[in-house]
Image (cartoon, helix red, strand yellow):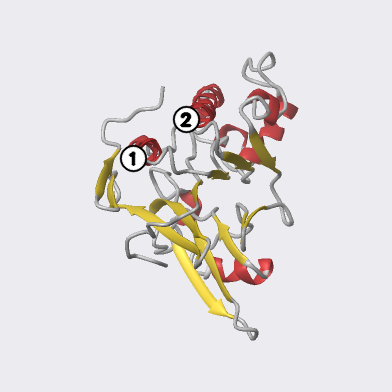
Amino acid sequence: MNIAPAPIHRTEMLVVVNDTQLKRQCDEEALGACIAFLEEYVDEITHFVFNGDILDMEEQSSFSKFPDQHGQSKEEIEAGKWLFRYISALLPNAEKVFIYGNHDARWDNLIKNQTMGLEAWIRPFEEMFEFKELDFQVIPYGTGNYYRWHDRIFWHGHRAGAKSNIPKLELEEAGISVTTAHINRNMFFEYVDAMGTYKSGITHGGFSKNNLSFMKKASTGWSQGFGVYYWNDEIGEQPYSIIMKHKNPTFIFEGKKFTGKGFRLP
């Protein structure tokens, strides 16, 4: 993973965001720092990828529910609509991609249940969030579904574990450099195959405001962040992982300070 300043001569810039867990599980200030970054680099960003679990859809989960989860779905729908419209308007000329995560895929449960007075709202996911009108390419959740950018593929991921080297496992399955999500922590793995080809597996932590119940089973290195990938025609890809301290939504990139303090979703 590169930590030096980004290359001056870059022909493409891709930003990937995952695990925002809208809305109650979202660290809104950390998301705000990411949005501040997007606004600063708006003229350079050529590709933007939502890599899954943008909505939490906890109310539709098959797992145990907590009383305070009641009514989340309406909040999540409105927050999602705002975020997707904002990104579309901010980056009209960028290639925009939405990759389903396992949480987003819970939308099907919402359609099946049709509860909590949402009947008039419920439409297919892509229609509800107007992805066609907002110029988003949509990638379904599941093995074999991915977005390809040069020599790297993006998918949400299929594993979560307390101690496993998830990027290594995902990289072995993909057979090509892969960026995955799904585990709420920043991780990196690399190797060179027998033909001398360099490959890397990368995950970015996202913006969940806590480490979520399934991640509390062990010391997991839970962390927040998103990804920035440059493409240079001479040297190829240069990936960067933006990592923020918990409860301190601030980072420095290329000598510029970005903060999301005080940011709240509409």
**Residue 54: x %, y % from top left:** 54, 39
Circle 2 residues within 10 Å: few <14, some 14–19, many ≥20: some
Judging depth in this view, the residue of 156 and 113 nearest the camera is 156
Circle 1 residues within 10 Å: few <14, some 14–19, many ≥20: many
The amino acid on which the numbered mark 1 sits, given as a three-letter code, is Ala
Residue behind mark 1: 33
For label 2, the SS is helix
Quarter that holds the C terminus: top left
Vertical placement of residue 110 versus 255, above or below: above
Vertical placement of residue 252 versus 84, above or below: below
The amino acid on which the numbered mark 2 sits, given as a three-letter code, is Leu
Vertical placement of residue 177 versus 139, above or below: below
Q: Is residue 200 visible?
A: yes
Q: Which of the two discs, 1 and 2, labels the residue nearer the N terminus?
A: 1
Vertical placement of residue 40 versus 129, above or below: below
Q: What numbered label is drawn on residue 71? A: none
The reply to whether discs 1 and 2 touch (Cβ–Cβ < 8 Å) is no
Residue behind mark 2: 90
Quarter that holds the N terminus: bottom left
**Residue 82: x %, y % from top left:** 50, 24
